[in-house]
Amino acid sequence: APARDLLHDTMVLPPVAQPPERAAMEARDVSAWFGSHKVLERVSLVIPAGQVTALIGPSGCGKSTFLRILNRMHELVPSAALAGQVLLEGEDIYDPGRRVTHARRHVGMVFQKPNPFPAMSIQDNVTAGLALTGVRVSARERADLVEECLTRAGLWSEVKDRLRAPGGGLSGGQQQRLCIARSLAVRPRVLLMDEPCSALDPTSTRRVEETIAALRGEVTIVIVTHNMQQAARVSDRCAFFLAEAGTPGGIVEHGPTPAMFGTPRDQRTSDYVNGRF
Ligand code: ADP
Ligand code: MG
């Protein structure tokens, strides 16, 4: 089916009520290396607050690297280097005076493979990130926070009677929503999701997509996906990454999802969203 038909799939998103296009994050001329291997070349992207931005493009073009740059996980790789600026609400997260915990707290991450602490209870999984990021809550607040975050992650009704059961006993899709709840507990401004449904069956994928749709407007979301149907269903905007033979990755085109699927300007975007490579 041509890419424009994907836009007629069910989950039609209403416009997000936000002050006009406030940027939650902005990448300015970001380049990245692993050793001498340059993997991103001068990537600039504005990520509007409250919206869902999808990063699309073939494997190996630097989408995950770009995502990890947005919360300073890139620097965990010893050979990694970076140039450019990343702004969170106008402030550079790489400013030498700023701690790495600033980025990690305000910019959460959900990975491809659900990674709850398997032996830890469901409720303790939700609050596991608080101590790591220096957020303090009382015992009473903790119970409320667990309920709130599990509700926002679309998991509360399924687990409310077994909050003390181990997180590892949940299904894969439930584990992924538990990881979303854990990310939400520190009240991030931005949630990064790296192919969050790639390891899930279609039903679980749908539940995670519904969770993303429900969070939209409250949390800024950046999602990497290889699934064009999913990008069409959940995102407001798309950025198409490409690394052409022997060159570092970059953004070919970005814009509102209907335009990216319906009227792409670049032939390579059209070819990609229509499944021609
Ligand atoms: P994508 O997520 O789009 O598939 P990645 O960001 O994972 O792309 O990878 C971009 C490039 O960086 C690839 O050439 C990949 O081999 C390389 N790369 C990714 N992670 C590392 C790493 N830890 N060490 C060295 N090279 C890496
Ligand atoms: Mg990746």
Image (cartoon, rainbow, N blue to C red):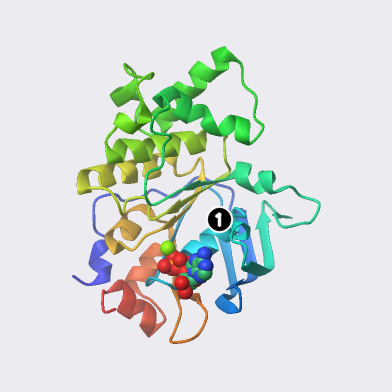
The residue positioned farthest toward the bottom in the image shown = 245
Q: Is residue 271 visible?
A: yes
The residue positioned farthest toward the top in the image shown = 140
Q: Nearer the viewer, residue 147 or 167?
A: 167
List x then y, in percent, for residue 161: 31, 16
Residue 180 quadrant:
top left
Q: Which residue sits at x=76%, y=56%?
A: 95
List x then y, in percent, for residue 151: 40, 28
Quadrant assignment for the N terminus: bottom left
Q: Nearer the viewer, residue 47 or 21?
A: 47
The kind of secondary structure element at disc 1 is: strand
Residue 214 quadrant:
top left
Q: Which residue sits at x=67%, y=32%?
A: 134
Q: Is residue 253 visible?
A: no
Q: Which residue sits at x=34%, y=30%?
A: 155
Q: Residues within 10 Å of mark 1 (few under 14, many from 20)?
A: many
Q: In the displayed structure, would residue 176 be above or below residue 49? A: above
Q: In the displayed structure, would residue 263 be above or below residue 94? A: below
Relative placement, left or right, of 108 versus 164 is right
Q: Which residue sits at x=65%, y=48%?
A: 103
The residue positioned farthest toward the left in the image shown = 1
Classify the position of ligand 2 by quadrant: top left, top right, bottom left or bottom right. Answer: bottom left
The kind of residue on which mark 1 rests is Pro
Residue at numbered disc 1: 48
List x then y, in percent, for residue 228: 30, 63
Q: In the displayed structure, would residue 71 be above or below residue 273? A: above
List x then y, in percent, for residue 88: 66, 52
Q: In the displayed structure, would residue 211 be above or below residue 75? A: above
Quadrant assignment for the C terminus: bottom left
